[in-house]
Amino acid sequence: MSGDEEPVVNLSEILREVYQEAALDLAIDYSVQPVPPLSEGDFQWVRSLMES
């Protein structure tokens, strides 16, 4: 409706909760290249996130 305010959502928190609830860390093997593969630099960045 006209004049309604846009809701403010914390997308980062929502995505974190979905990731945890879906147990994606158990379903996705981040140690191998995805299909289609990432550039080597992007792949190294993803792997560095796992070490954090």
Image (cartoon, helix red, strand yellow):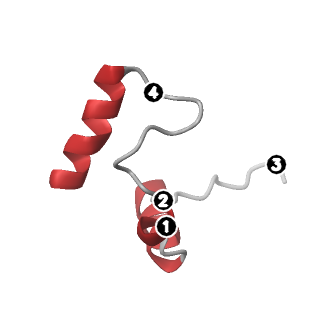
Q: Label 3 amino acid?
A: Ser
For residue 33, which quarter of the picture? top left
10 Å neighbourhood of mark 3: few (<14), some, or many (≥20)?
Answer: few
The span from disc 3 to disc 1 (Cα, nearest Å) is 39 Å
Question: Looking at the image, which residue is at 34% across and 32% down?
Answer: 43
Q: Secondary structure at mark 4?
A: loop
Check disc 3 and report the residue beneath it: 2
Question: Looking at the image, which residue is at 26% across and 32% down?
Answer: 44
User: Which of the two residues, 2 or 41, is positioned nearer the viewer here?
Assistant: 41
Up/down of 45 relative to 16, above or below: above
Earlier sequence position, callout 3 versus callout 4? 3
Up/down of 29 relative to 40, above or below: below
Left/right of residue 8 with respect to residue 51 in the rendered view: right
The span from disc 3 to disc 4 (Cα, nearest Å) is 43 Å
10 Å neighbourhood of mark 4: few (<14), some, or many (≥20)?
Answer: few
Q: Which mark is residue 38?
A: 4
Check disc 1 and report the residue beneath it: 24
Left/right of residue 4 with respect to residue 21 in the rendered view: right
The span from disc 1 to disc 2 (Cα, nearest Å) is 6 Å
Q: Secondary structure at mark 3?
A: loop
Q: Secondary structure at mark 2?
A: loop
Q: Nearer the viewer, mark 3 or mark 4?
A: 4
The quadrant in which the C terminus is found is bottom left
Q: Label 1 amino acid?
A: Leu
Q: Label 2 amino acid?
A: Ile
Earlier sequence position, callout 4 versus callout 1? 1
